[in-house]
Amino acid sequence: MTHDPQKLAVAAVLFLLLCICLFALVYFIDQLVQKRIFCDRYNLDFLPRGIRIRGAKDNGCNEYELNYPYWYIAKNDGTADKRYNNNHIVWQKSYLWVGRYRLSAKKPTVILEVVHSLRDAGTRVELNEEERKKKRWLEKQKRLFARDTTLQNIVDGYRDCPTEFEQMCAELFRKQGYRCQVTPKTNDGGYDIFFRQGKETGIVECKCYSVGHKVGRPEIQKLVGANVIQQANKMLFVTTSSFTPEAREYAKETDVTLISGQKLLSMLQKYGFPKDKIKVRRKEWQLTVQDLQDFIPQDIYWDYFA
């Protein structure tokens, strides 16, 4: 009895496809069952799309880890290098360990959503590294503003850590309704903050100088030069000090908004941090999607997370 090799090959392919379909069906059903059991156990209504769940060793500590997407070929600021046609986003999995379960997702925001839901339902999830840093930063802000705030207090508080001053300024703009992203510590492109509100965009340079310092024209020119590439609608220069007449004149010519130390102090008094208690509540230190702007390249964040 002879067999047609072509028919045998077709049969083998069909059998392989059937096995793959059966495996996918079993996996799909298993995920549905596991997710339902997880939700019932932890008092959740549902798990968001994109979650994968599997068993894990219970180490007695509920914790999570966020990993962020990046371009396979990136520029110094993390955005896509458009000189390469086959460039693509590398998605890293983020993880959450709860009890005897390990949850994973391609997007960090999906894991963050589950963490929020678990905490709201009464399940303790330990602070991750980003939240610990955010909480320490908020505690510092509240200690700083718990006493009568002066420009000298601000300078003393941020002199040794200018990046925290940039974060404080970004938070101040967020309180006014802007979406802000602080640029990386190195290769910042000539500005410290990128903000967006609707179709309006802007870049901000932040300098924590001694009260008697005068910001000159060259520093304003640097910001204007950075915007030749960025093409934002607005340019702002924020400092704890003041500006020379030449800097003010040039800023007027180039449409740069100058925020001196005294104006910054007024903004802090209007939009700033509470001055009564130093306690930082969960809704303050808990990570939000907006917080992730500091870890995700701008062109990925605005396309996939905003």
Image (spheres, rainbow, N blue to C red):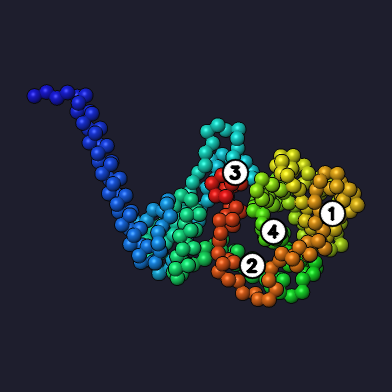
Would you say residue 57 is visible in this rendering? Answer: no
Residue 11 horizontal/vertical position (percent): 21, 31
Measure how far apart labels 1 and 2 are at the Cα level: 28 Å
Per the image, the residue denoted by label 2 is 138
**Is disc 1 in contact with disc 3, using a CB cutoff of under 8 Å?**
no
Would you say residue 30 is visible in this rendering? Answer: yes
Residue 268 horizontal/vertical position (percent): 74, 65
Per the image, the residue denoted by label 1 is 215
Measure how far apart labels 2 and 3 are at the Cα level: 28 Å
Going from the N terminus, do you reach mark 2 or mark 3 first?
2
Nearer to us in this view, 77 or 251: 251
Per the image, the residue denoted by label 4 is 176
Q: Secondary structure at mark 4?
A: loop
The residue that appears at 20% across and 26% down in the rendered structure is: 7
Residue 135 horizontal/vertical position (percent): 60, 67
Going from the N terminus, do you reach mark 4 or mark 3 first?
4
Measure how far apart labels 1 and 3 are at the Cα level: 32 Å
**Above or below, comparing residue 30 to residue 284 in the picture:** above
Q: Secondary structure at mark 2?
A: helix
- Specify the amino acid type for callout 2: Leu
Residue 299, label in figure? 3
- Specify the amino acid type for callout 4: Gln
